[in-house]
Amino acid sequence: MASDMTSDTFLASKKISDEIKADLSVNPQKYTMLTGDRPTGRLHLGHYFGTIRERVRLQDEGVTTRIIIADYQVITDRDTTEHIADNVFNMVVDYLACGIDPAKTIVFAHSQVPALNQLMLPFLSLCTEAELLRNPTVKAEQEASGHALTGLLLTYPVHQACDILFCKGNIVPVGKDQLPHIEQTRQIARRFNERYGQVFPEPHGLLTDAVEIPGLDGRKMSKSYGNAIALSATAEETAKLIKKSKTDSERFITFDREGRPGVSALLTTAALCTGRTEEEIAAEIGNDGSGALKKYVTEAVNGYLAPIRERREELAANPDYIREVLAEGNRRANEIADATLNEVREAMGMVY
Ligand code: TRP
């Protein structure tokens, strides 16, 4: 269950995820994708290669696609909503610049869809305190935050169940760390259906095949580590960031993730942006050293991001359009959420 992601549980999830992937292009109409991001800053290359690219692929394959900007999740582990409106705005810009098409994908903000949030009350009744407390990802986030465990952080996997189930999402592209939440969502759906009648699907996680793109220092790419290349950074800012990234004193370039995290992170970044392998690039640079490697990576990243950044600028120059896209996404999400909440009321006999 949601307690421990033993390797057996992981392997089972991976197997189902692979089966769904094989079926997606054959039967895209069977699937509804829901996933999203917390608007805590700008999206970066880690988001792009980790999930955004996959969302665009699903959208273009004909899967029903919804993206939630999880603004309430910002306050799960921090105590301010500073810059939130700016972050939400830029998140929409980033999505569209990457190829999310608002005619196909509903993009909406969590706080703007009251009926989605109202699912929280019946759903909370379907979880025990012990189940909530043993979610390993919640524990890890609480420890990293250095704050006491808030009620919101403890229950955010239940919010995510609301996010996924309000639109009857049945596939959720996620990283491994979110698998316990998917398990909790499945349990909530199952228990609701058992008690009140069939309303919700039991969703599955869609695990990404992409290698996790490391940050410039070899750790996970994250804005808070200062090792992330934002999609919205300029070519000059990108060059500067790569230039000051830490490599090592060995001149000859080789790919060795454990032994040479800095050099290897650069190689993986270049590999993702060029479609070549790390080994190939390392062999080509060889004795030219880390200066040449950094130059190569800078060109690879800036070349890859150039069209995205160009679209980004055009979009950001038209803020009314961006706000319209979000307003329309919110409107459509509300329609879906209202319909689902009505079904829930009916199933529970709460129609007066
Ligand atoms: N927790 C996710 C993150 O931090 C964002 C998110 C919110 C989400 N609701 C979701 C992801 C529902 C998948 C499904 O990035």
Image (cartoon, grey):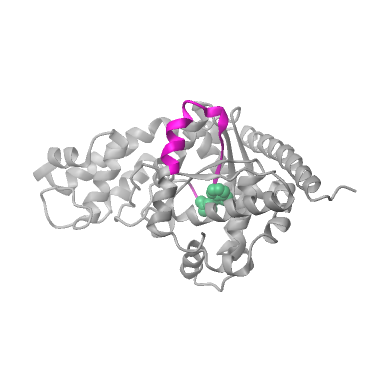
Q: Above or below — where is 282 with respect to 122?
A: above
User: Is residue 38 at least partly visible in the picture?
Assistant: no
Judged left or right of residue 75, residue 232 is left
Seen in the picture, residue 61 relative to 93 is either above or below; the reply is above
Q: Position of residue 72 (x, y in %)?
A: 63, 55
Picture quadrant where residue 332 is located: top right
Identify the residue shown where x is 68% and y is 60%: 124
- Tell me where the magenta segment starts and ends, as one range: 16-42
Is residue 302 at all visible to an observer of this figure? yes
- The image shows residue 323, relative to residue 150, as above or below, that is above
Q: Is residue 92 magenta?
A: no
Name the residue rendered at 34%, 37% in the picture: 302
Residue 221 position in % (x across, y down) = 38, 53
Residue beneath the point at 46% across and 39% down: 52
- Decide which of 51, 28 is in the foreground and name it: 28
Q: Position of residue 108 (x, y in %)?
A: 63, 41
Report the residue at 63% width, 32% height from top.
321
Lateral position of residue 278 relative to residue 131, left or right: left
Is 217 on the left or on the right of 13, as rendered? left
